[in-house]
Image: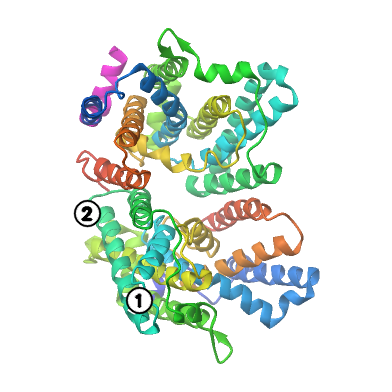
């Protein structure tokens, strides 16, 4: 059997209408949203505006790619937002004013994130802590450490190049979108084409069977948490560049938004089923909806209500296809 | 007392209880040594005023967690109910007798709706309550963005009232926990919660209406949130949509520290009570010795990890 046995979507060939709807439902939904948005406000569909919308969504996209890995192995990472802010604070700790510090900042951020991911993964696998509690504890600890370091005050000592990462363009394409595309493609290939990726799906669909088949279950799960944390760390740096100053709450809400987007993209919380690119589509839907609420002239709080309805609705929609 | 002992035996939670209880005693002794204001009636009454809100929400959370679920809507619900109470009482200060049962009914109904959606849509509790929390929070903010409203003096006095030296909040909290414990241990419907949480399929085969139990557990969680909101509104005198935000995750800490496992079916309200005592006393003590609230977060995170990761009796997967 090939890797596609574990793939989330049903096999091609005789696709029924229902199957097509399940597979492309999100794309159809996104198209409908875009048409509605364009009807309400014609400038919405202009490339410039769309690129803007996507640029804002790029850091969230990076987090969602990582979150997908963790959810695939029956996990959940609540610490991503706290990690983003902590990495942002870490970046300012260099007090660097020159661009030559940027590589160092990235290395430090990635190493730090990897350690956080290692700890979460270790707690989940070796100590049998539920992912919810392990990452919740990490979230609170990181928050405490961060506030203790900054004393609660925002900081803004950043190399000027950081804002280029967030809002700069190469050949007219925003740098952070390029980064997101590279990150998603690389990790997508790892997930859907490599042995490690197959092991992730095996562990996610049936941890015991995976172990019996010689898959190093714990190592796979730990690596997923490390990947998720690194994605969140990188996302934090890009968000930092966008915001410009480090408040202690950079990225607040991203932990839940990343889960919402992944669930909308059909990543099953029960593990073993999902796809990085569909999860990114979930991000697009989320962002377009948030935009639409504003375009329609509703108060911004309406976003919360709609987000709530959508996450329950999306989960219910994907739940039905199990039967 | 016998109920408590049975509780300990059946759930093999004695170790957790003894550890948490001992830690609590150590804290109290340390507090007494570190500050002469710590072991005073004044601080005791102050402590219970902090404790009752977290205690009520954690109590509700305990039922849900015993069922193998989780309620992430409680924080938003508490905020919404304080807004409801303060707004209603500002409009009709004389209708306190109506406002309180009304808020309890609304909260119970919202809790039951959470349970109903979990049962009918067959969606993970995390997603349903997360979505519900977002909906409630958004709706509350659309009604009132900033804290506001007012409460009659009689209601405010209730929050600070004492019987002799003992604050009413302490009596109420202990009584409610005792009732909840008795119900869980001594009645059939209470036992069904353990049964359905431990092994839903076996419970179903044995004639337990698992779906009804799930809805009941979430309804109780809603009712407990109403209890917290009533006390909070009486104490602060305003309705604040954001006041419960931190409570959602905070309410889970005492539950797991008290030995109730997230997988469901094991634990109890006594553990939660000890957990609430421990967490609140620790924060209270850290305030006394001037440790910044930032480190209190770090300590809270470490407590969760230590309680869960090094609780060797934890269920292996």
Image coordinates for residue B187, horizontal then vertical, percent: 42, 17
Image coordinates for residue A49, horizontal then vertical, percent: 68, 77
Assess disc 1: are there few (<14), some (14-19) or many (≥20) residues with their C-alpha within 10 Å of its C-alpha: some
Q: Quadrant of residue B171?
A: top left
Q: Which residue, given by chain and number where applicable, does mark 2 sit on?
A: A126
Q: Is residue A126 above or below residue B202?
A: below
Magenta range: B1-18
Q: Is residue B34 above or below residue A237?
A: above
Q: Assess whether residue B5 is covered by the magenta stretch.
A: yes
What secondary structure is the stretch in magenta mostly built from? helix
Which residue reaches farthest top?
B164
Mark 2 on the same chain as mark 1? yes
Is A98 displayed left or right of B94 in the figure? left
**Label of residue A106 in the image:** 1
Image coordinates for residue B82, horizontal then vertical, percent: 60, 32
Secondary structure of the residue carrying tag 1 is helix
Q: Quadrant of residue A77?
A: bottom left
Quarter of the rendering occupied by the N terminus of chain B:
top left
Indicate the chain on which mark 2 is placed: A
Q: Is residue A238 above or below residue B286?
A: below
Q: Is residue A201 visible from the viewing direction of this image? A: no
């Amino acid at each position: 059997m090939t890797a596609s046995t574990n793939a989330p979507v049903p096999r091609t060939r005789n696709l029924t209408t229902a199957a097509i709807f399940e597979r492309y439902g999100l794309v159809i939904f996104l198209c409908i949203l875009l048409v509605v948005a364009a009807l309400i406000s014609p400038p919405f569909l202009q490339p410039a505006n769309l690129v803007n919308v996507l640029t804002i969504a790029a850091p969230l996209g990076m987090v969602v790619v990582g979150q997908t890995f963790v959810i695939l192995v029956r996990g959940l990472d609540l610490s991503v937002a706290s990690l983003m802010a902590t990495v942002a604070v870490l970046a300012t700790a260099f007090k660097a004013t020159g661009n030559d510090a940027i590589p160092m900042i990235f290395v430090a951020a990635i190493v730090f994130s990897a350690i956080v991911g290692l700890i979460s993964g270790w707690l989940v696998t070796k100590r049998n802590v539920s992912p919810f509690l392990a990452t919740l504890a990490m979230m609170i600890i990181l928050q405490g450490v961060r506030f203790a370091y900054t004393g609660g005050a925002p900081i803004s000592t950043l190399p000027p190049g950081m804002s280029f990462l967030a809002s700069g363009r190469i050949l007219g394409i925003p740098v952070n979108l390029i980064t997101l595309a590279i990150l998603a493609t690389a990790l997508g290939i790892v997930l859907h084409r490599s042995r490690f990726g197959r092991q992730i799906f095996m562990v996610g669909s049936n941890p015991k069977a995976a172990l019996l088949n010689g898959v190093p279950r714990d190592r796979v799960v730990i690596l997923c948490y490390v990947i998720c944390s690194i994605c969140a760390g990188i996302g934090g740096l890009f968000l930092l560049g966008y915001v410009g100053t480090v408040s202690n709450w950079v990225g607040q809400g991203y932990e839940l938004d990343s889960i919402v987007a992944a669930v909308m993209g059909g990543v099953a919380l029960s593990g073993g089923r999902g796809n990085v690119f569909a999860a990114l589509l979930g991000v697009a839907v989320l962002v377009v909806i948030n935009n639409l609420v504003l375009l329609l002239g509703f108060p911004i709080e309406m976003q919360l209500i709609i987000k709530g309805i959508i996450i329950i609705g999306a989960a219910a929609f994907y739940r039905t296809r199990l039967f | 007392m016998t109920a408590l002992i049975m509780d300990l035996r059946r759930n093999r939670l004695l170790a957790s209880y003894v550890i948490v209880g001992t830690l609590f005693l150590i804290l109290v002794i340390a507090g007494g040594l570190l500050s002469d204001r710590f072991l005073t009636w004044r601080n005791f009454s102050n402590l219970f005023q902090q404790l009752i809100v977290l205690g009520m929400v954690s109590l509700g959370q305990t039922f849900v967690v015993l069922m193998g679920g989780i309620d992430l809507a409680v924080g938003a619900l508490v905020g919404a109910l304080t807004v409801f109470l303060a707004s209603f009482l500002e409009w009709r200060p004389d209708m306190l007798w109506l406002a309180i049962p009304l808020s309890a009914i609304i909260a119970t109904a919202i809790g039951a709706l959470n349970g109903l959606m979990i049962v009918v849509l067959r969606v993970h509790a995390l997603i349903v309550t997360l979505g519900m929390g977002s909906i409630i929070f958004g709706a509350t903010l659309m009604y009132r963005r900033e804290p506001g409203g007012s409460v009659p003096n009689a209601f405010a006095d209730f929050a600070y009232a004492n019987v002799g030296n003992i604050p009413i909040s302490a009596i109420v909290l202990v009584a409610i926990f005792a009732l909840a414990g008795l119900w869980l241990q001594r009645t059939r419907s209470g036992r069904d919660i353990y049964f359905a949480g431990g092994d839903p399929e076996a419970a179903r085969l044995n004639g337990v209406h698992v779906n009804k139990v799930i809805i009941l557990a979430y309804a109780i969680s809603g009712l407990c949130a109403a209890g917290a909101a009533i006390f909070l509104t009486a104490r602060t005198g305003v309705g604040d949509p954001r006041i419960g935000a931190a409570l959602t995750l905070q309410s889970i800490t005492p539950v797991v520290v008290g030995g109730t496992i997230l997988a469901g079916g094991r634990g109890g309200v006594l553990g939660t009570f000890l957990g609430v005592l421990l967490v609140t006393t620790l924060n209270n003590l850290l305030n006394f010795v001037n440790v910044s609230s930032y480190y209190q977060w770090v300590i809270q995170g470490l407590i969760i990890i230590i309680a869960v990761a090094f609780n060797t009796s934890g269920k292996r997967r």
